[in-house]
Image (cartoon, rainbow, N blue to C red):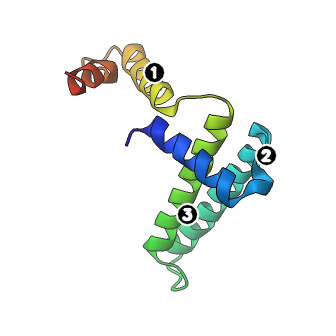
Amino acid sequence: MNIRAFQLKCQARDSILFPECVDWTPADRLVELIGELGEAANIQKKLKRDYNSVRFEDLEMEAGDAFVSFCLWATGLNVDLETAAIKAYNKVLDRKESDMRRLDDLRREDHS
């Protein structure tokens, strides 16, 4: 499954499981995303301090929650995250005048 398909799956799941959130704006989704990132940051802090109250799996779960929230935010803005990420990746390559292969080149090879 590509990222765009995942974005749409997240949106469909949320519309069924959380009908009260259907009319959320991108700003509402951004608040949700920041909350999820805060939860991940708290677990990261506890892992660093060597608390026994959290495990790496807790961080993995929060990272997944944050990614889903990120997908919902981007979908609400009609942003195709795969396209946006490829553009951002390639922009750095261009700015640094790198000889690494651009992702759009690799993407074309995947579809050949």
**Is residue 42 found left or right of 6 in the rendered image?**
right
**Disc 2 marks which amino acid?**
Asp
Residue on which disc 2 sits: 28
SS for tag 3? helix
SS for tag 2? helix
Quadrant location, the N terminus:
top left
Q: Is residue 18 visible to the viewer in this orientation of the structure? A: yes
Q: Quadrant of residue 71?
A: top right
**Disc 1 marks which amino acid?**
Lys
Residue toward you, 93 or 32: 32
| N-term mark: 3 or 1 | 3
- Residue drawn at x 39%, y 38% is 2
Residue on which disc 1 sits: 87
In the rendered image, residue 23, in percent from the top left (x then y), is placed at 80, 44
Quadrant location, the C terminus:
top left
Classify mark 3: residues with Cα within 10 Å, few (<14), some (14-19) or many (20+). many
Which mark identifies residue 62? 3
Residue toward you, 20 or 81: 20
In the rendered image, residue 42, in percent from the top left (x then y), is placed at 62, 67
SS for tag 1? helix
